[in-house]
Image (cartoon, helix red, strand yellow):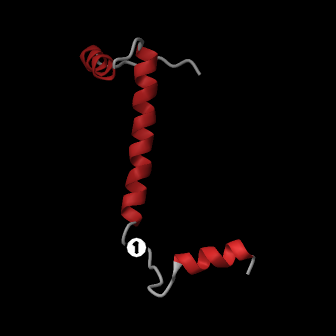
Amino acid sequence: MPTNLAIEDALLKKALKAGGFRTKKETVTKALEEFIQRRQQRKILRAMGSIEFREEWNYKVDRQDRESGR
């Protein structure tokens, strides 16, 4: 999807250099991918501590049960 963006030249130059990219498109694409990844990681971090685990659960026994077809 073609898009025209007004991005600060100095900021884009810094990103090009920092990332070692050859094109502006490559730089912006990678920046968007990293932005999305960080936001997804934040959701995971917020969930930490909110999930309760069964203290008595034994993953080794559970794995053996699944492997043996029980």
x%, y% of residue 65? 67, 79
Q: Residue lying furthest top in this view?
A: 22
The residue lying at 42 percent from left, 58 percent from top is 44
Q: Amino acid at mark 1?
A: Ser
Q: Position of residue 21 (x, y in %)?
A: 38, 16
Where, by quadrant of the figure, is residue 5 drawn? Answer: top left
Q: Nearer the viewer, residue 55 or 22?
A: 55
The quadrant holding residue 26 is top left
- Residue name at image x 40 percent, y 73 percent: 50
Q: Is residue 52 above or below residue 17?
A: below
Quadrant where the C terminus sits is bottom right
| Number of numbered markers | 1
Residue 53: give x, y in percent of width and height. 46, 79
Side (left or right) of 27 relative to 15: right
Residue depicted at 44% across the width and 79% down the height: 52
Dot 1: element: loop
Label 1 packing within 10 angstroms: few (<14), some (14-19), many (20+): few
Give left or right: position of 4 versus 6.
right
Image height of 67 relative to 58, above or below:
above
- Furthest residue in direction bottom, as rendered: 56
**Above or below, comparing residue 25 to residue 65 in the picture:** above
8 or 49, which is in the foreground?
49
Q: Using the image as rendered, state which of residue 64 and residue 10 is in the foreground.
A: 64
From the viewer's perspective, is residue 33 above or below residue 37? Answer: above
Residue behind mark 1: 50
In this rendering, position of residue 70 left or right of residue 38: right
* In this rendering, position of residue 65 left or right of residue 50: right
Is 1 in front, or is 45? 45
Q: Residue 18, image x and y in percent?
A: 28, 22
The N terminus: image quadrant: top right
